[in-house]
Image: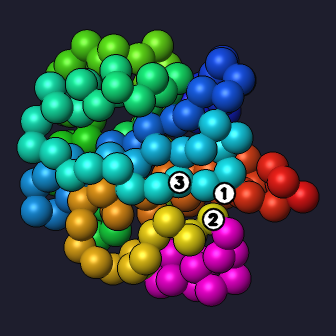
């Protein structure tokens, strides 16, 4: 499902969760706030079943699959495999079309600090941080970030 369609079908005030397979092989998770203004890291997990449990616990309305900060062709294949290999317990599932680089994340942390205050260091190597960086980039692209939500 395309991101714009996912957002048009998302139940109001339901957060979005992002899953990214990190370069270390862990599944990083992050969650948006209910207004889709910013993302914060959740957990770095080992299995899709742990992610599914987290989905149920957090009651998200949608799941998006992102890409790590450092990307290879294997990352694209791995993301598609994870996305399609499991019957996720959330009604809306999508993959991100674009990704944010580490330099973009660091630059945005300087200028758009409101969106990034939950992410101490975008380069800390944690899978959950990579997911939060990816989700913040997606929220910025599709929802125009914190300032669009809160003025």
Earlier-in-chain disc, 1 versus 3: 3
The answer to if 126 sits in the magenta stretch is: no
Question: Residue lying farthest front?
Answer: 57
Query: Residue at position x 26%, y 50% from top?
Result: 43
Q: Which mark is residue 140?
A: 1
The kind of secondary structure the magenta stretch mainly shows is helix
Which scheme is used to colour this image of the protein?
A: rainbow
- Between label 2 and label 1, give the one nearer the viewer: 2
Q: Position of residue 150 (x, y in %)?
A: 84, 54
Question: How far is the residue under mark 2 from the one under mark 3?
Answer: 7 Å
Q: Are marks 2 and 1 in contact (CB under 8 Å)?
A: yes
Q: Position of residue 53 (x, y in %)?
A: 24, 25
State the residue position of label 3.
39
Which quarter of the image is occupied by the C terminus?
bottom right
Res 48 → quadrant: top left
Would you call the spot at circle 2 few (<14 residues within 10 Å), some (14-19), or many (20 or more)? many
Is residue 134 visible to the viewer in this orientation of the structure? Answer: no
Q: Residue at x 25, y 25 (%)?
A: 52
Which disc, if any, is residue 115? 2
Task: Give the CA distance from mark 2 to mark 1.
Answer: 9 Å
Q: In the rendering, at what x and y percent does residue 85 appear?
A: 18, 22
Mark 1 vs mark 3, foreground winner is 3
Looking at the image, is 81 positioned above or below residue 106? above
* Contact (Cβ within 8 Å) of mark 2 with mark 3: yes
Specify whether residue 127 is in view.
Answer: yes
Seen in the picture, residue 3 relative to 31 is either above or below; the reply is above
Circle 1 residues within 10 Å: few <14, some 14–19, many ≥20: some
- Residue drawn at the location 41% of the way across and 30% of the way down: 58
The residue at the far right in this view is 151
Give the x, y percent position of residue 98. 50, 54
Read off the magenta span. Answer: 103-114
């Amino acid at each position: 499902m395309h991101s714009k369609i996912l957002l048009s079908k998302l139940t109001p005030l339901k957060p979005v969760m992002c899953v990214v397979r990190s370069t270390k092989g862990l599944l990083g998770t992050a969650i948006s706030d209910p207004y889709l203004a910013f993302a914060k890291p959740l957990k770095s997990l080992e299995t899709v079943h742990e992610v599914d449990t987290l989905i149920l616990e957090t009651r998200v309305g949608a799941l998006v699959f992102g890409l790590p900060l450092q990307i290879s062709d294997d990352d694209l294949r791995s993301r598609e495999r994870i996305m399609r290999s499991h019957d996720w317990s959330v009604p809306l599932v999508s993959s991100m079309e674009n990704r944010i680089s580490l330099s973009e994340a660091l630059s945005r942390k300087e200028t758009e600090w409101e969106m990034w205050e939950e992410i101490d260091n975008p380069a800390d190597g944690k899978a959950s941080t990579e997911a939060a960086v990816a989700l913040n980039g997606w929220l910025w692209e599709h929802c125009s970030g914190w300032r669009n939500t809160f003025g």
